[in-house]
Image (cartoon, rainbow, N blue to C red):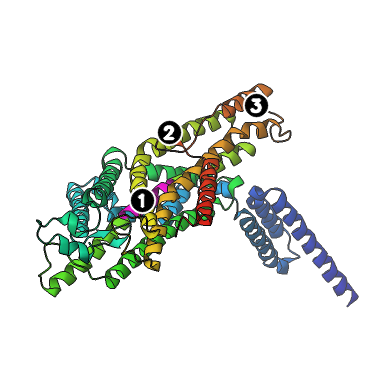
Amino acid sequence: MSSISIKVIEFDTSVTNNISKEYWQIIASPYNNASSNGKENSSQQNNDEPSQSTPSTPSLLSDLQLHSTEMGEIAEMPDYENLSTSAVLHYCKYKILKPYLRLLGVMGLRPNSEESERISRYCILSNFHTFQVIVFMCIGYVLQYMACYRRDRGFCYVAASLESEITTKPRSYEKTCHGNAIFAYFIPNGLHLIAYLYTVYLFRVKENEQLQNLMERAFLLSSNPANRGGQKRLVRILWLFIGLGVVWMISALVAVSLMSARDVVTFQWLKHGSSDIKTVLKVLLILCTMWHDMVQGTIITSYCLQGQLLISHLHFLRVKLLQHTVSGLEWMKEISEFRKLLKYFNDEYGPAVCIYTVVNMSWAMSGTAWLLKYDIQNSGINPLTCINIANVILWIWIAIAPFIQAARLTTACSMIQSVGHEVRVRPFVYQSTPGEDLDTLLLYTSSLKMCARLYRVPITGRYLCLLLTLGSVTSLTLGQCQFFY
């Protein structure tokens, strides 16, 4: 019995020694597993005594290999260096780009599918859809003119006392509705349509890949190891802007619907028409007005999205330079490409937003003056309701949104100007870089002059804060002097 126990102990010791040697061989050189396993199998075949241990040893070694590979996969899972370009572009396309391009296609700003640009039949259908959108918008302008519906205050008709005085005079539409028809309807609606046509020309004729190019570049930069989690964070921010735009559209639709339900709508030239026709025109007026708001909200939201992508683009470039994951020359080339994107943002896409901002600011200021009873003609029939106040707030919201985004972009551009100083004083990251290269990079970043512009004017946060402070002080002073009573 003692001899048998000694043999068993010796056998176990040899097995464990073989396992330990093989385990350290796997850790030290994983590519030599096949050769080491072959040698062990040959040695086991020459040895006749431990015939029972032959099937157990490879199974244990395979378990060790399995655990080691599993540990390697868990460790490499958050490694962003292994993300391929196709995987990043696929993530960008299906998370944000493709749904938003569909929204632009519904608005008639882009083809509804990628095949529409190559197949003539789809191209004709896409152009016909854009033509339908334009016609639908024009119908909405005519219905607003007929119903005396103004976007700054709702349905506004002439007082009854004024109607009795003009019964002997020729009937004219300017005297039927409140305000001048040219300034209240024709000019704002004309500017609204011009801004849409310019955006259609910009997206479909001149350049229709700028948003896609910018979004793909931003997502590729976010796949850098120094920007871990940047892709998901960027997707959340972009969807936040889209969500805010949708909230504005829904709020504007609710305001128009409540105004239509509250007031008695009378269409010019159809005062003696049937009630069914009036109901259909009333519903059509709400739908056309909703479409106007959707078109404008989509264009301004697209401006905010491009601004956010440019901000993220600069942030990712700054992190890459500070972490020294890119050479100074390559980083300068990236900045040169960014300046092209910024030029398009300011000079090409900015004019459409500027036109909409003129209209929105005029509606916001006119509605505010009307609520404060500074309208000379119609100061006696001024209803101060929550719907009218909410309507004015919506126009203020959509008017100041581009300025806020442009100010944020200017702040990000000014941050890039100081990144050269941060690089110059980093002793460990750039210790092997020649001082001449660092001085060149410092001079390049300090000489950069980039900013967001609206109306050819640089938009900065300090100017917006100054205007907000002056407006608050003026309102408070006038209120203390009882100017608003």
Q: Quick check: 251 left or right of 446?
A: left
Q: Dot 3 surroundings within 10 Å: few (below 14), some, or many (20 or more)?
A: some
User: Which quadrant is home to the C terminus?
Assistant: bottom left
Q: Quick check: 442 left or right of 186?
A: right
Q: Which residue is mark 3?
A: 438
> What is the x, y in percent for residue 138?
19, 53
Q: Inspect the magenta stretch and tell me whether residue 468 lies in it.
A: no
Q: CA distance from mark 2 to mark 1?
A: 29 Å
Residue at point 9% right, 60% down?
A: 168
Q: Is residue 214 above or below residue 420?
A: below
Q: Quick check: 122 left or right of 202?
A: left
Q: CA distance from mark 3 to mark 1?
A: 47 Å
Nearest to viewer (mark 3 / mark 1): 1
Q: Which residue is mark 1?
A: 360
Q: Which residues are magenta?
A: 295-306
Q: Which numbered disc, 2 or 1, marks the residue that appears first in the sequence? A: 2
* Residue type, numbered disc 3: Leu
Q: Which numbered disc, 3 or 2, marks the residue that appears first in the sequence? A: 2
Residue 139 is at least partly visible in this image:
no
Q: Main secondary structure of the magenta part?
A: helix
* Residue type, numbered disc 1: Asn
